[in-house]
Image: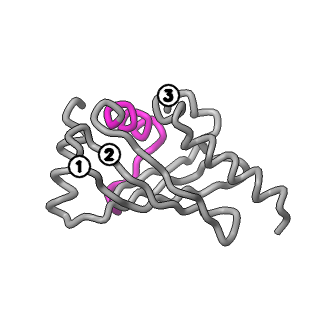
Amino acid sequence: MGGFNITKNLKLVKYFTSEFYLNHTNDLSHVASPTFEFSVNSGPVKGFEEYAERRAVFNHNAKLVFGKFRSDDDVHFYTEFETQLLNGTEVLGTCMFEVSELLIERVEIIYNLTDKEFAELERILLKNS
């Protein structure tokens, strides 16, 4: 496994999660695989369009801060993240990005919450949808 590939895939994930594109997710369709999958807390799998719609609503109600990315295989990139709600509440979680052929194939988000806490978070985050 060469450093060149790791750099390209990691750069792609960082590009996908950059602050600018968190606010302009639709502009990322060119780096999303045609078979892109997205899920939150092992919920239903959705496509890129639903991901972009969720991000647009989410951005009105919270700020997302990613930690350092790590990968053991240059395919799956993991990071901890913090969701900062407008009311001052902070929620932690883990995110996984899967890269295939220089495209984002899958995004999986897991919040460190009980089912009840997660339902309340979803209500707050998506209240304008």
Task: Give the mark, 3 or 2, whose residue is nearer the N terminus.
Answer: 3
Q: Give the percent coordinates (x, y) of residue 108.
A: 45, 57
Q: Residues within 10 Å of mark 3 (few under 14, many from 20)?
A: some
Question: Within the image, what quadrant is residue 99 found in?
Answer: bottom right
Question: Residue visible at 16% across and 51% down?
Answer: 120
Q: Is residue 128 above or below residue 6?
A: above
Q: Residue at x 57, y 58 (%)?
A: 68
Q: Disc 3 vs disc 1: Cβ atoms closer than 8 Å?
A: no
In the figure, is residue 71 to the left or right of 21? right
Main SS of residues in magenta = helix
Which of the numbered marks, if any, corresponds to residue 89?
1
Residue bearing mark 2: 84
Residue appearing at x 30%, y 55% in the figure: 91
| Residue 62: image location, x then y, percent | 31, 39
Question: Which amino acid type is marked by label 3?
Answer: His
Q: Which residue is mark 3?
A: 24
Q: Nearer the viewer, residue 84 or 13?
A: 84
